[in-house]
Structures are given as structure tokens and as C-alpha cells.
Image (cartoon, helix red, strand yellow):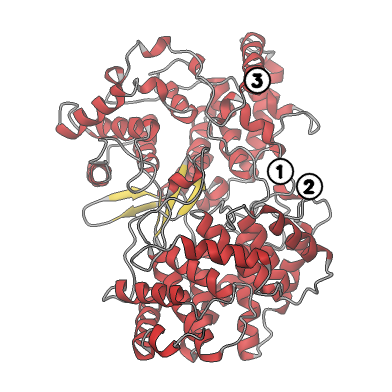
Amino acid sequence: MMLDLARTSPDPQALDRAIDGACGALYRTQQSDGHWVYELEADATIPAEYVLLRHYRGEPINAELERKIGVYLRRIQSAAHDGWPLFQDGAFDMSATVKAYFALKTIGDNIDAPHMKRAREAILKRGGAVNVNVFTRILLALFGIMDWKAVPMMPVEIALLPQWFPFHLTKISYWGRTVLAPLLVLFALKPRAVNPRGITLDELFLQPPLTIGPAEKAPHQNAAIFAFFRGVDIVLRKTFTDPPAKLRERAIAKVVDFVSERLNGKDGLGAIFPAMANACMMFDVLGDKEKAAIARDSVERLLVIKDDEAYCQPCVSPVWDSVLAAQALLDVGSPAAVASARKALDWLKPLQVLDVEGDWIVRAPGLRPGGWAFQYANPHYPDLDDTAVVIMAMDRAQKIDGDKSYDAEIARAEEWVRGMQSRNGGWAAFDIDNTYEYLNNIPFADHGALVDPPTEDVGARCVSALAQLGARPDDPNLKRGIDYLLGEQLEDGSWYGRWGLNYIYGTWSVLCALNAAGLPHDHSALRKAANWFLSIQNDDGGWGEDGDSYKLAYKGHEKAPSTASQTAWALMGLMAAGEVSHPAVARGVDYLMRTQGSDGFWEEERFTGTGFPRVFYLRYHGYRKYFPLWALARYRRLRNSNERFAFGM
């Protein structure tokens, strides 16, 4: 039966107005040099840790800044469970709640204030602060609240282990590497916080906190493997109570060399808050005031300070924001939109890492650098996701205006992307074959994110890039990539999303890749995925999913409120599967048009980005700005042309 497209399609003039409004809003937020950067918000832990870092070091009290951070922390406390969640409307999280309470008490909040009393009662009702995670235990040990015996044993001498050993820094993820390396020195030297106000947390425990021993295994950990590593932990505690001084000195020196090489100036170690803060504390205890100041300055640049509140970001996202905004504008296709996108791409061009062999070189000796990082600068850690999206945008811009000024950058980046493919045909974010999953069972890895294996979303991005750049179906990298993606599809038709929430993000990403690679729209994988999207649409026409979708006992999609960014992903996924004329797509487009704000953007309080599944989530403030525009522009383009979309995203 033929659809009456005039009856099912949104009004073309209203669609044009929505797109024009969103474009105008993007133009107004573009920086003068061409890039975009929007806020990147996590949960309460990062702003709490920022406050505690200041008090750990005994820095002069910045009362106004702490007042603003206090306002922020109180605002995001949950009215449903009185604690702090990991994402909007999420469940109580013990570690986030203990850190937020600790920070507020340090700022000066009275423990008998209603919000503090409610938080304390929520903590105690759930067994007390003994149930915090490993990173929180380390923080409490640094303040002398817990004993170091409550923290997994990680002797600094592991930095001297050979690469073939089952544990080595090259076997864990970039974020694990940069966070753990300076921590090893802190574990060895066990500095004590200045803590000028003498804040303690005895009221959060059901037992004397200094009597607490090692934590139990985390839910994701295998009992037998964890028990083995717990045995190793016991042996290490006995072996390294008083290690040879020369051995310890050599190990600390190796860690210091590692961190110093990657200190990264004002952008910080790994360009992520935990690594920066740990580097600052490491150089403090070693007495290196110059490098401690560099690390401390990098942390300060993560602050977002508003009129009445403030918080600290986990990192910044200028490359990601800029290239995604540019992609949206390239889909709009007007001269003004293309010019704005070109300005962003020109800003991105010199940020390509061409002269630093990052940590990835261990698994790819001889491969020339050629990627982009997520942040302003992070040369040791470019990532495949940003790199693939940048070269797709550059290629598309050149095909629009015929200007070949990005050819060299594209070719060099394609060489790097090809060289970073893992053995299973997929791609990880930062490394090759970083699949040492057994390491997620060591006591330190209760977060379950110690490694960086290939993932469907990053793999999809790389397949998209190679296909868009003209790789033929028999191209070995492309073929292995497609086979990997097809093999990872779940029975319900969806794909997992590691870096965005979650199956909506992953399924959009893979559908774009398979479409770009030329798989027919009637291919069974595309049909199953499209049907999955159709089956989970909300009654309001949008799509939504929250962080609970990462739970270990996941059994299928659970309804969540619609968001602008997830609706955009679902729409672009359906259109990649050839469903531009489906009534569900029209309803989704209508949802975006109805919910657009008067400023041209959309509201989105919910978190739709992922740092570490089940542990750390992200609210990209840019996602509600460029993804809905992108979906609307894609819809207009395909409805007007009736063509198969030929680009990778």
C-alpha cells in the first residue's frame, strides 16, 4: 500500500523554519576562530573531587567559588532517594553520594542541615560508606579517613614489569594508564591531606572506618578470577611492606618519566580530570613545585563558572563538538552552513597529530601518526572516533565545493585508521587489541573499565569513513570491519553503544556504516535494526534510553523519556535503513519540531553520553544543539531528493 506522503510528512515550510532557527543558533555559538565547544557535564563526583583537591593541598579558601559549587551540588541531589545519582533521574550511587557529602561538609555545610541529614540517612540505610568504590577508598585513605589496607595493593614497582607480564601499563586503557601511573606513586608514599578544616566522616560509617579491610568483588567480576587476584594482593602486601630502596627509587623514576612526557601543559595529563588531579598530587609529594603547578593549572581550566553556581568538567570536547556541528551544517548544505562548517574544519586541520607516536605505537610499530584527539590537545592519545568523523566531514566538504585543501590530512588519517584495526576486525577508541578482559577482575578494577576493546560504535565510524572515502567491497579493512559489525548484532536487531546511550546510539552508528558500505536496504541486518527502532518509539514520537540499559542483567529495551539527541539518532538510523517515508520517521521529525525552543535549540537535561558503562555518564550540552538539526536536515534532504544517502554519517 502506497503512503500518502503529503499527509504523513511535516509541513515543508515549518521544517525550513526549524532548520533555519537551529542553524542561526549554531552560528551564534561558534567561536571566532571557527570551533565550537559546549559544556561537558558528569555527575557530582568531579566537582566534589575538585573541592577536595583544593583542601587536600591546603590551598587558600576560595569562598565564592566553593559557594557556587555547593549550590550546584545541592541542586543535583535527588529528591527521590536523597543521594546523588550517576545520571539524571538515576538510582542512588554510594560513591557519588559520599563524595558530594564530603565536599559539602568541607565547604562548610552543617551536617544537621536538612539536605545533609537526608544524604547521611540514605548512606547509612544502605550499609554506610564502607560500600564505596575503590577510587573513593583511595580518596578517603589520602585524607586519613580509611586505612590504606582498605585499598587494593598496587606497588609502584609494577611499572618495572616487562611487557610480556600479565599485568603491564600497555595492557590497560589510556584512561587507566594515565590515572593509575601517578596513583602508583601515591600508593607508595602515602601522603596525607592537609585538610585545614580537619573534616572527618565518621558519621557515615557503621563501624570505625580505620578498621575496614579490602572490598568484596564487584558484580561484574568473576568469583574465581577475583579470588586469585585477591590472593596476589595478599602476597604483594607482605612482599612490599619494605621494598629495597633502590628498586622503589627506580620504579618511581620510571613513573615520573612517563607522566612528565605526557604532562601536556595547560591541557593536562591525558586531558582528563582524574589523571590531572593525580599528577598534581604526585608532583606535590615528590616536591616538584613546577610540574605540580602545571598539573594544577590544567585542572582549573575545566571549571564552568556561572552567575550562581559552578562545577568542574571531566574534560572538554572541542574537537568532537566542532566536527559534529560541522557535519550537521554540511547536511543543511546552504552556502552559509557550508561556510560555517568549513571554518570549523579549517580550525581542526592543524590539530591533526602528525609528529607524536602515542601509546598506541606499542601495538603498531612503524605506523605513522595521523589522528585527532577529543580535546584541544592530547597528542599521546588521539582517538579513532574523532579521527573518522573529522575525515568524513573534510571529505564531504570537498565534494560540496571542489576545494581539495584537506586531501593530505585525509590521506594521512586514513592510513592511521587502517593501521589501528584490531584482529577481530573492529576498532577500539584509542588502542589496538586492548582486550585483556581478565584485568577487569583485579581488585583495583571494580569499575570494570580497565581495558579498551573494539566496540561497535567506533568500529562503525571507521567502516563509515573507509566506505565514504571510496574503499571497494573487497577492501580487506572494510570487509573485516563489516563482518565484525554484522557479527555483533543482537538478536533483537540492535547494536551496543559503548560511548553513547546506548543501543539507540550503537544501532544508529552501525546502520550508517552499513548504508555507506552499500549493503542493500532489504538486507536482513538492516531490516532487523529498523524494526527494532520502530518497536521502541515512544508515544510522543521521540525515542529515549537511560543508563540502566548498561545493567548486567539487560534483557531488552526499557522505555525512557524521549530526548532530542536520541530521537535524532533513531531518525538518522531509520533513514540510513531506507525508511525516510515511514510514518514513524514523520512522527519523530514532528517531535523535534514541536520541542524546539525559541532560541533554536532543544532542552535536554537527561544524560545521553557514556564515559564508562554502569560507572560514569556524560551530559554533552552540545548534543541537543547539533544532533536534532542534523536529523531534520537529513530528513529534508532525503525527502526532497529521494536518493540513497551516500555519506558515512
Residue topped by disc 1: 434
Alpha carbon separation for disc pair 2 and 1: 9 Å
Bin the neighbour count of mark 3 within 10 Å (Cα to Cα): few under 14, some 14-19, many 20 and up: few
Query: Can residue 321 be seen from the camera position used here?
Result: no
Under mark 2, the amino acid is: Arg
Question: Could you tell me residue 84's position as x and y percent?
Answer: 32, 38
Location of residue 114 with respect to 358 vertically, above or below = above
Q: Residue at x 76, y 59 (%)?
A: 483
Residue topped by disc 2: 363
Instruction: Tell me whether circle 2 and circle 1 mark residues in contact (CB < 8 Å).
Output: yes
Location of residue 198 with respect to 384 vertically, above or below = above
Alpha carbon separation for disc pair 2 and 3: 30 Å
Q: Quadrant of residue 136?
A: top left
Of 367 and 431, which appears nearest the observer? 431
Alpha carbon separation for disc pair 1 and 3: 22 Å
Q: Residue at x 59, y 28 (%)?
A: 221
Query: Can residue 34 be seen from the camera position used here?
Result: yes
Helix, strand or loop at label 1? It is loop
Under mark 3, the amino acid is: Ala
Q: Nearer the viewer, mark 2 or mark 3?
A: 3
Helix, strand or loop at label 3? It is helix
Question: Could you tell me residue 125's position as x and y percent?
Answer: 29, 23
Bin the neighbour count of mark 2 within 10 Å (Cα to Cα): few under 14, some 14-19, many 20 and up: some
Residue topped by disc 3: 224
Q: Residue at x 47, y 85 (%)?
A: 3
